[in-house]
Amino acid sequence: MLVQRRIKVLDAQQDINTQVEEEIGDRQREMYLREQLKAIRKELGDDDGSENLEELKERVAGLELPPAARKEVDRELKRLERMGRESMESQVIRTYIETVCELPWSEISERKAGPLGRGAHPGRGPLRPRGYEGPDPGVPRGAGHARSPGAQTGARRGSSRR
């Protein structure tokens, strides 16, 4: 019984070791092929990928980002450095970083704050969430608010209780 259990454990360890060796072999092969590809591009004079990446890094370095955004963008830049240019994911990451670079991080958007300040809605009072049926935030309690009879009883439109 003990011998059989030991054999099963050794078989499992051997399977794990085989999988790890295959994974390492695949990664080494991929890295070798990437280096060959890089050498071929350099030989052909088509090595502008690193220059574009350096330009992108410079653009990111010039941004005044909040700490959380800086951390995320730096993480994505590192991922972009590790993967090849041909990867679909690298294009998504590059687009994400370029979009972050185009955002006005150091400016307050006039459209967001508006001329009357946050939450102001000219001519209609303060904004309320959609579907909100409580009293208006600007009306003091007990001032009375005109509502439909259905809203006071909790009955829904179209429903009839007979």
Image: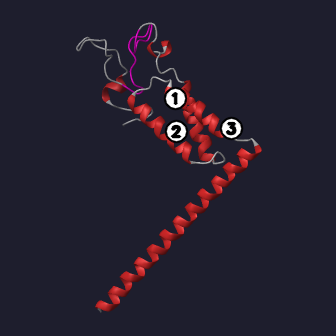
The residue positioned 52% from the left and 39% from the top of the image is 77
Q: What residue type is labelled 2?
A: Leu
Q: Mark 2 points at which residue?
A: 77
Q: Do the residues labelled 2 and 1 touch (CB within 8 Å)?
A: yes
Looking at the image, is mark 1 or mark 3 earlier in the sequence?
Answer: 3
Helix, strand or loop for disc 3? loop
Q: Name the residue under label 3.
A: 48
Across and down, in percent, residue 40 comes to 72, 50
Say which mark, if any, is on residue 60. 1
Relative placement, left or right, of 81 versus 143 is right
- Asked whether 10 falls inside the magenta stretch, the response is no
Q: Which amino acid does label 1 sit on?
A: Val
Mark 1 → mark 3, Cα distance in angstroms: 19 Å
Magenta residue span = 117-132
In the image, residue 161 sits, relative to residue 134, either above or below, namely below
Mark 2 → mark 1, Cα distance in angstroms: 9 Å
Is the magenta region chiefly helix, strand or loop? loop
The residue positioned 62% from the left and 48% from the top of the image is 84
Looking at the image, is mark 3 or mark 2 earlier in the sequence?
Answer: 3
Q: Do the residues labelled 3 and 2 touch (CB within 8 Å)?
A: no
Across and down, in percent, residue 116 comes to 42, 7
Q: What residue type is labelled 3?
A: Asp
Colour convention: secondary structure
Helix, strand or loop for disc 2? helix
Helix, strand or loop for disc 1? helix
Mark 3 → mark 2, Cα distance in angstroms: 17 Å
Across and down, in percent, residue 126 comes to 38, 14
Relative placement, left or right, of 116 versus 51 is left
Relative placement, left or right, of 69 versus 101 is left
Q: Tell me the quarter of the image containing the C terminus.
A: top left
